[in-house]
Amino acid sequence: VLGLLAGPESGVSVGIVAGFMGLTVYMSVWLLRMVTELDEARGAAAALSVAEERLRFSRDLHDVVGRALSAIAVKSELAATLSRRGDDRAAAQMDEVRELAQDSLDEARELVRGYRSIALASELAGAQSLLEAAGISTAIRGSADQLPVELAEAAAWVVREGVTNILRHSSAENCSIEVFADGVVIANDGARIAEPNNGTGLNGLRERVGAVGGTVETVQDEDRFTLTAHFPSRTKESR
């Protein structure tokens, strides 16, 4: 009788142990798979972060170098013209070229460190000076004070990219820059047929403005090109 009793009890015990071991193996395999997938996800996230950082760096480098080279080219050409005429102002223009090169080098260093930011007021003043040095009559309406602080830097990038495009991609004689509480509008004549609508600079600008909830639009009507950045409404009164 004891043998008969022992038999079924032993079978049940073996079944329980086998089931437990099977469950343990299953859980171990599941846990290993989860750890592997998590590791792969972390690797993918790291790769994505690297790609995003490279994109940010290339965009910032384009903005800094593009503006700097355009400014240096304009000032150098003006200095050369003045020098051929024997005008003493040529030396002052070359001094400005040197300062532009030094400022650009400082910006590039700040870019590498990731600490760079620009101010709208200084960009507006610099834009007018640079455009007029290139022989482009420039009218600026509005001021940096009309935009909330959280939007001012994005607006400054709009001005920088817009001015760079005018210098590099047009034969403009007139330009206007308007600053509103909810946007910036830059318009110029002398637009070429190949005026860029989706170049690296404009795509980067759309990303910057999009980061604060805004949009960028470009319109070309014959030889007139208009770049408009719309920002979301803030506490200040919109136009």
Image: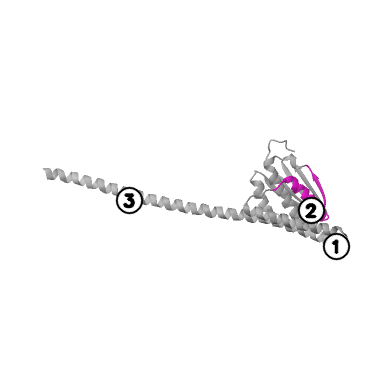
Circle nearer the N terminus (3, 2): 3
Crowdedness of circle 3 by 10 Å Cα count: few (<14), some, many (20+)? few
Amino acid identity at mark 2: Leu
Query: Which residue is at a point 87% across and 64% down the rendered structure image?
Result: 84
For disc 2, the neighbor class at 10 Å (few under 14, some 14 to 19, many from 20) is many
Q: Residue furthest left?
A: 1
Q: Residue 4, located in which quarter of the rendered image?
A: top left
The secondary structure type at the circle numbered 2 is: helix
> From which residue to which does the magenta span run?
118-142
Magenta stretch holds residue 120:
yes
Given residues 193 and 165, the one toward you in this image is: 165
Identify the residue under disc 3: 25
Q: Position of residue 126 (x, y in %)?
A: 77, 50
Between marks 3 and 2, how big is the CA–CA gap? 72 Å
**x, y percentage for residue 19?**
28, 47
* Residue 198 in sight: no
Residue at x 75%, y 45% (from the top left corner): 121
Asked whether, in this view, residue 45 is left or right of residue 235, the answer is: left
- Whether the magenta-drawn stretch holds residue 123 is answered as yes
In contact (CB < 8 Å): disc 2 and disc 1: no
**Residue 142: x percent and y percent?**
78, 42
Above-or-below relation of 196 to 147: below
